[in-house]
Image (spheres, rainbow, N blue to C red):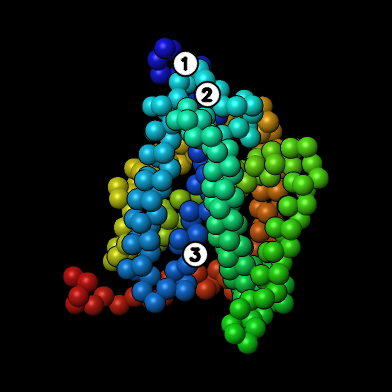
């Protein structure tokens, strides 16, 4: 009934935006490397476990929805807030479908909020350590907790909650658009950093990294093209205008700030710290 892409490629691109939104924060796995005793072992293990869990709990769940619910049947309400899972449960004769999904969504939201609270706290502390944020944000408590950075991150969550509670839905779309734009830019920067990292190791005569990305040059390029395509598509999707209206100016501001800091020498210490150390070949590298 309609075949693949019954509403054209536009529907697919819109779906990809929401799919990417669901994966925002997965890069936090690499951020935890600084707190791992053996990152060479733990980070690949965590990445594999994350992919397996996402495939099990997200991809398979969506597959069930697609197989059970006809694409012509719209979730109750027909809006962005409607849940296709509620439609599945109601079709199965479960009367408490809405309540079950509310519990699941709240649990997932709290888990995501906890992850992002850790990530932003860690990032703020790291920026302060590298003199790219106020020094007070890097101060630790007697138990080793960056309380100031944690308080600032928690304040941001409170502000977002207040905006959401006192708005008719526009706050969600604004935060959604900015989040998608920022996430795609961050992932593109990670891909660029990975390419630069590999090139620098070859230039310095260092052995390949013990942790390898499968088919790195090809997969990296494919992912970059895909991310750019999704980013461009947000410009043409109604309701996602904030992704460009707010995300692009903020990104330009960040780039301009970096260029000013680089020209004035305020980030020379950071660039020096990121240089690879001198390497002397060992017999085990042969």
Residue 70 position in % (x across, y down) = 45, 20
Residue 252, can we see it?
no
Q: Secondary structure at mark 1?
A: loop
Q: Secondary structure at mark 3?
A: helix
Residue 99 position in % (x across, y down) = 58, 42
Q: CA distance from mark 1 to mark 2?
A: 9 Å
Q: Could you say which is closer to the camera, residue 266 or residue 102?
A: 102
Residue that mark 2 sits on: 11
Dot 3 or dot 2: first in sequence order is 2
Q: Secondary structure at mark 2?
A: helix
Q: Residue at x 78, y 52 (%)?
A: 162
Asked if residue 49 is positioned above or below residue 92 in the image, the reply reads below
Tag 1 and tag 2, C-beta contact below 8 Å: yes
| Total numbered labels placed on residues in the image | 3
Mark linked to residue 6: 1
Q: Residues within 10 Å of mark 3 (few under 14, many from 20)?
A: some
Residue 32 position in % (x across, y down) = 47, 67
Q: Could you say which is closer to the camera, residue 246 or residue 3?
A: 3
Mark linked to residue 31: 3
Q: Residue at x 19, y 77 (%)?
A: 283
Dot 1 or dot 3: first in sequence order is 1
Residue 223 position in % (x across, y down) = 42, 41
Dot 1 or dot 2: first in sequence order is 1
Q: Residue at x 40, y 15 (%)?
A: 3
Q: Residue at x 47, y 15 (%)?
A: 6
* Mark toward the viewer: 1 or 3: 1
């Amino acid at each position: 009934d309609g075949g693949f892409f019954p509403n054209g490629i536009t529907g697919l691109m819109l779906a990809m935006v929401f799919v990417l939104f669901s994966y925002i924060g997965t890069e936090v796995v690499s951020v935890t490397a600084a707190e791992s005793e053996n990152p060479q072992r733990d980070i690949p293990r965590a990445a594999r476990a994350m992919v397996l869990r996402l495939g099990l709990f997200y991809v398979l769940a969506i597959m069930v929805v697609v197989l059970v619910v006809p694409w012509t049947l719209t979730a109750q309400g027909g809006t962005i807030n409607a849940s296709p899972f509620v439609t599945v449960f109601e079709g199965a004769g479960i009367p408490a479908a809405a309540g079950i999904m509310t519990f699941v969504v709240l649990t997932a939201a709290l888990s995501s909020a906890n992850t992002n609270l850790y990530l932003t706290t860690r990032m703020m502390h790291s920026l302060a350590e590298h003199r790219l944020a106020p020094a007070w944000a890097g101060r630790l408590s007697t138990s080793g907790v960056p309380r100031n950075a944690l308080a600032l991150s928690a304040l941001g969550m409170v502000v977002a909650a207040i905006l959401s509670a006192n708005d008719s839905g526009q706050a969600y779309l604004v935060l959604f658009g900015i989040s998608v734009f920022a996430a795609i830019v961050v992932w593109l920067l990670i891909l660029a950093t990975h390419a630069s990292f590999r090139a620098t190791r070859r230039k310095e005569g260092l052995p390949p990294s013990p942790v390898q990305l499968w088919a790195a040059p090809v997969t990296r390029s494919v992912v970059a093209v895909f991310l750019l395509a999704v980013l461009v598509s947000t410009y043409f999707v109604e309701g996602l205008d904030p992704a460009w209206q707010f995300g692009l100016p903020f990104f330009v501001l960040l780039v301009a700030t970096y260029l000013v800091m680089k020209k004035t020498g305020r980030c020379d210490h950071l660039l020096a710290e990121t240089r690879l150390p001198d390497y002397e070949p060992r017999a085990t590298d042969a």
